[in-house]
Amino acid sequence: MSPDIERLLQLQHLATTIDEARQEIAAHPQRLADAETRLGEATQAVDAAKQRLKTSQDARRDLEKEAAVFQGRLTKFKDQLSAVKTNREFTAMQHEIDAATRDLGVVEEKVLERMMEADAVAVEVKQAEGELASQKKAIEAEKKTLTEELATVEASLKTASDARAALVAQTDPNLIARFEQVAKARKGIALSRATYDGLCTACHVRLRPHVFQQIRQNDAIIQCDSCQRIMYYQPPPPPIEQAVTHRS
Ligand SMILES: [Zn+2]
């Protein structure tokens, strides 16, 4: 393979590494923000459950006040019952007592419902708090990993950029210009391998036979007629039997 094609292959490899590293670095803030969002959601779930518990407890306190009023009224009626003088007054008072007892029963029933509701909501609060605690741990670990990954990818970006600069310095500027021109037009991929049966792997167009013959020599810069990528050829690996024979 010509040194020029070898350099371009290395250049392509480095350019791809650099592109990927840059994309990963660009995505870093969003990945951090996503982790923070998940933490925020878990915190909100705890707050919402606590709010439901408070609402339920407030409602229960109101009902208990109501029950106390009915209870007071009932006590008063019972006291008055001993002081009535006629049957008519007695019957009327008895009606009042029955009504107050019913009202009190209804409110006490509601108090019980609220107590059971509060028990269930308290369990939800505990569950949400547990979920928040485990999310906090997971997100802290994730942030640590993200920070380490960022450092690694920044280091690999620097290594690849330095290697690229060194490679560019020892390569014909016209060749670099041609590479950059194709890369720009073809989403960063300036090189394409010719298949064993003469297709461009990038655009799948069949190469003209004499062009394919030239590409197989790997000693000139030849571009695909269709996608303009710079073509190279990798001969098939030797058959296994042959390799074994050769070694023995
Ligand atoms: Zn092509």
Image (spheres, rainbow, N blue to C red):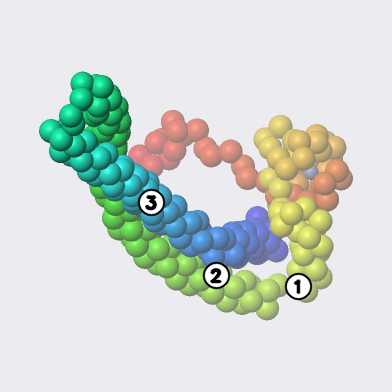
User: Viewer-proximal residue, 146 or 156?
Assistant: 146
Q: Nearer the viewer, residue 38 or 28?
A: 38
Tell me the quarter of the image containing the C terminus.
top left
Q: Secondary structure at mark 1?
A: loop
Does dot 2 land on a helix, a strand or a loop? helix
Residue sitting at x 18%, y 29%: 85
User: Which numbered disc, 2 or 3, marks the residue that appears first in the sequence?
Assistant: 3
User: Which residue lies at the image location 85% right of the left edge and 37% below the top edge?
Assistant: 208
The residue identified by callout 2 is: 157
Callout 2–callout 1 Cβ contact below 8 Å? no
- Between the residue at mark 2 and the residue at mark 1, the CA separation in whole angstroms equals 24 Å
Disc number lying in front (2 or 3): 3
Between circles 3 and 1, the one closer to the viewer is 3
Residue 169 pos. (x, y %)? 68, 78
Instruction: Indicate whether 227 appears above or below 133.
Output: above
Percent coordinates x, y for residue 10 in the rendering: 61, 62
**Residue placed under numbered mark 3 in the picture:** 51
Q: Report if the beta carbon of the residue with label 2 is closer than 8 angstroms to ligand 1.
A: no
C-alpha span from label 2 to label 3: 49 Å
Q: Is residue 212 left or right of residue 90?
A: right
Residue type of the residue flagged with mark 2: Leu
Q: Residues within 10 Å of mark 3 (few under 14, many from 20)?
A: some
One can see residue 222 in this view: no
Q: Neighbour class for label 2 at 10 Å: few (<14), some, many (≥20)? A: many
**Which residue is rendered at x = 37% and y = 48% of the image?**
55
| Residue where numbered disc 1 is placed | 172
